[in-house]
Each structure stands twice: as C-alpha cells, then as structure tokens.
Amino acid sequence: MQAAEMQETETGRRVRDDIRNVAIIAHVDHGKTTLVDGLLKQSHIFRDNQQVGELIMDSNELERERGITILAKNTAIIYRGIKINIIDTPGHADFGGEVERVLNMADGCLLLVDAVEGPMPQTRFVLKKALELGLRPIVVINKIDRADARQQVLDWTQDLFLDLATRDDQLDFPVLYAIAREGIARRAPDDDNDDLEPLFETIVNVVPAPEVEVDGPFQMLVTTLDYDDYKGKYAIGRITRGRARPGMAVAHISREGELARGRIGQVFTWRGLARVEVDEAAAGDIIALTGIANANISDTIADFDTPEALPTLAIEEPTLKMTFGVNTSPFGGREGKFSTSRQLRARLYRELETNVSMRVEDGSTADEFIVSGRGELHLSILIETMRREGYELQVSRPEVITHNDDGKVMEPMERLVIDTREAYIGAISETLAIRKGRMANMVYDGQGNVRLEYDIPTRGLIGFRNAFLTLTQGNGAMSSMLTGYSPWLGSIGTSRNGVLIASEAGVAVTYGLNNAQQRGQTFIEPGTPVYEGM
Ligand code: GDP
C-alpha cells in the first residue's frame, strides 16, 4: 500500500481509496456465480490458462448441486489498482444470522435481480439488513437477454427500496442491466456495451472507500470461521483499526468479555478466490488469520496492550432439533467408512468449530446425539455433507424448539413464499391449512402464474417440501424464512396415511415393488437389499 493511496481526514482516520468492500445479494439462480466469474475473468487476476469457472465449481460440490450458497465466501478482484473485496452472502434464510454478520464487513451492496423473476423474498430480507446497516446499494438486473424479461422488474425493485430504505439517499441507487453469461453490463438496457466495465466503475464510484485508523492499535471482530486440518482455525473479519502481521502478540476477547493473550500465526488476504499469505494487512481490508485456536464468532482480536472489545454481533438460536444416531438397522456399518458412535460424536462436535448456529448434545444413550440447527435445510446440509464424507448415521424426524415466554409456549414462525400455476392453489391451500399456515398474500401475474405467501409455524413446514413437489407435479418453487415466534398454534394434523414395511429379508425385485406401488410410494429400486421390518 502506498501513502498516496490514503487521504488523511481531520479525525486521524484515513480513506483507503485502494479498497472497496461490497456484499453481493442474489436469489438462487439469478446469476451470482456467473457474474462473479465474469468479474474475475475481466479483472485478469488469473493467468489465461486457469479456468475460473472450474475454480468456482471446486468450492463446494453440495452448494453447486443445491444451487445455494451455504457458507459465505470472499473473492477479491483488482480494478485499476483498487482491490474490490466481494463478500458473498448466503442464499438461504436458514443462514440469516450469518448474513447479518458478513454484511458488517461491507460498505456497499450489489443486489442482483433476475429480469424475469424480479426480487425474491430472501433477497428482500438480506437487502433489508443491508440498508439498515447503511450500505450503499447498486442494483444489477441480470439476464436481460431472456425473451421473457419483464419491464416491471425495475418497478418491483423500486417498490422494494421504497419499503426498505432507511435513508433517502438509498433510494437514489444506480441500476445496471446485465447479461452475466456474456460478461456484459450496461447503463441502459439497449446500449451496446459489451463488457463489465460499467459495473467495475460503478462499484468503485458508488461504494465508499473504508475510512479507518490505519495507525491505531490493532482491532478486528471475528465474523466467520474456517477450519482445515493443517492450520486449524481461521478467524475471518475486517480489520477495524491498525495492522495485522504474522507472529504478532494479540489480545483475544471473547463474546462474553473474557480476555486471553495469544499470537497471530499467519495473515491472509484474498486474491481471486484464493487466500494468499501476506506480511501485513491494514485496517479496511478483510483478512483471515490463524493462531487463535479458540477464536469464536463475534470475539475481538485486538492489540496486546490495548485490548478493546468491539460491539458483539447477534447469534441466532436454533429452531429445530434432530437425533443423530449410529445406524442400528441390520445393515448398519455396510455403507459408510465411519459408523461408530465415537466417530460420529467427534465429527458432530467438530462441526461446532465453524457452524455457529448449531448445537450438539449427547443423547439419552451413548449412540445418540441431539443436533439443533436453524431449520430443515441447515440440518439436512450437515447430514448430506457427512454422508459424502463417508459417515453412516440414522436421523430422527426433526422437532421444533420452543421458547417459554412468561409461561406461554412460543414456537418459531416462517414466511413461506410459493410460486406456482393457478391450477394448484386449491390443493396447496388445503394442505397448508392443515399445517396451520395462514395466507398473507396472493398475487396473480395474469398469465396463469401466482405467488402465494403464508405465515406458518416451522413445525408445519417439516416435510412440506416433498408434499409440495407432489402436489404441483414439480411446477412450483418454494422458499421460506424465519420471521419470529408466536404462541403455540395447537396440534397439527398429520398427513401421513401409513407406511410400507418389508415383510421378509432379501433383495427387492421389480415384481414385488410393482405390487407395493399400488398401495403407496416406494423409495427403493429393484436390486436394493432389504431387511424384515424395513
Ligand atoms: P447463482 O445461483 O445466482 O450463482 O446463479 P448462476 O450464476 O449459477 O446462474 C444460474 C443460471 O442462470 C445458469 O444456468 C446461468 O447460465 C444462467 N445465467 C446467468 N446469467 C445469465 C444471463 O445473463 N442470461 C441468461 N439467459 N442466463 C444466465
């Protein structure tokens, strides 16, 4: 960093004009990966023989398949000597708390909106947080090449801002039009620009440069954590004040205010998608540091002699719990590399190192563990990740975690948003009514599509996704997010009609399955070994 790049202000703080920190907010499939990929390519961070797309694909197989961002990751690009840290925000509200934390590292946000779908409920939630934090917004309407791109998307986006803006100047946001897939951003939908230059320029001009005390005592709030077997824990955050260097003695102040002394191991910043080791990083930049083994989200790492804590960040409570147990079926131990309770226990407790909203307790027997998380998706992702790592386990049906508020039982509530065809409204309403859902909004688009919004207890959503796919024959999309707690809404009728159980051990055959299918849905294929009672 050169002195010329920093302008001194009256307060002794300096504007670091060589850095911009921008969060990217997008609904699943609106083109976030494609856009970041384009920015990386056009910023020439990679050698020509490196495949940016492949690097992105590498980041997490499960995320790619599910089409959501599970863990917010950072990317850094260089544009005209300015480093732009792009802070990814999780694409699902089960990770809501993480959203708020990572937004804290940014000074601006880029809202990416699909030119057909328009803004979606989860982006609304994230944008609301971003505006509350005072981030300067930029809107990018993507996929304008699509034949069904809708003019109204800009109006919808403007309405959204009218609803959510906390300051007048947030209504005055720049809008760009993009074809991320071709690496194009335009200031007007029909100009003929053919690269992402307008977007780079807008980011640099609109997102404020960090204004920080570079020469003060070091101070950083831990915002996210990462872990690997070689270096152990990485504490990730934006340096609020001062500088970080490898080997530097520091104070570690926990969320609860306990003070410990420690030493930074290595310091990393981002370059492209990779973390690179550096000799020094200064306030305003986003870094990862090793060496603080028991660092936790919302702890402060500070100067050794000036151990001042930063304000803590909210960490959200889990809403659902499930029992994870050793597979006790007669086929136990056949499918996974790791199937003992000791292995399962170690893996679950390791998850707590980085997954802040997760809780693990020992269960009623040595073979069982109670795992609590932020929703079905949060838990199912852990299960799927463990399965891929070679763990074999059995899980119970999820149960909601209630609160006690002055003697009243309170349960978590969600806002459910469904996009589907009008023809399915009846079936969906009926099913949701049984599950204690209350319709909050219904919007027709005049072309046979409808958007339904419901307030529904988290309990009522358990297992609903499958029912929904069957009801709509795949013609629908649904998403939900936690909105708060409500007094217990009473018992929910179950829609489970019965189960099919194998009457003897052996291997399933087509003939037998055909018979079973006349009575219900089967989950196994011909050739699958079955045990009696399965
Ligand atoms: P993400 O889930 O937000 O990361 O979305 P992706 O970047 O994976 O994009 C989702 C899909 O939209 C992919 O199939 C992309 O090829 C496609 N896509 C991205 N940008 C554009 C675009 O500008 N035009 C069109 N037609 N498709 C796009």
Image (tube, rainbow, N blue to C red):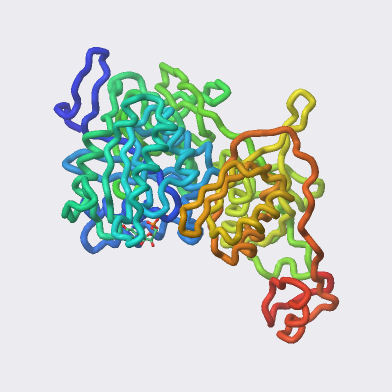
Name above or below for residue 191 compared with residue 252: below
Going 45% across and 18% down the picture, which residue do you hit? 307
> Is 63 displayed left or right of 514 in the figure?
left
Residue 291 location in percent, x, y?
Answer: 45, 36
Can residue 167 be seen from the camera position used here?
Answer: yes
- Depth check: give the residue in front, 382 or 209: 209
* Residue drawn at 44 percent across, 32 percent down: 163
Relative to 30, say whether 481 is above or below.
above
The N terminus sits in image quarter: top left
Looking at the rendered image, the quarter that the C terminus falls into is bottom right
Answer with the quarter of the image where residue 8 lies. Answer: top left
Residue 509 position within the rendered picture, expressed as x and y whole percent measured from the top left: 73, 84
**Residue with the most extreme top position:** 10
Q: Nearer the viewer, residue 250 or 124?
A: 124
What residue occupies the far left of the structure in this picture? 4
Q: Picture coordinates of residue 343 (x, y %)?
A: 67, 55
Above or below, 337 against 269 in this view is below
Answer yes or no: is residue 508 visible: no
Residue 248 pos. (x, y %): 37, 29
Ligand 1 quadrant?
bottom left
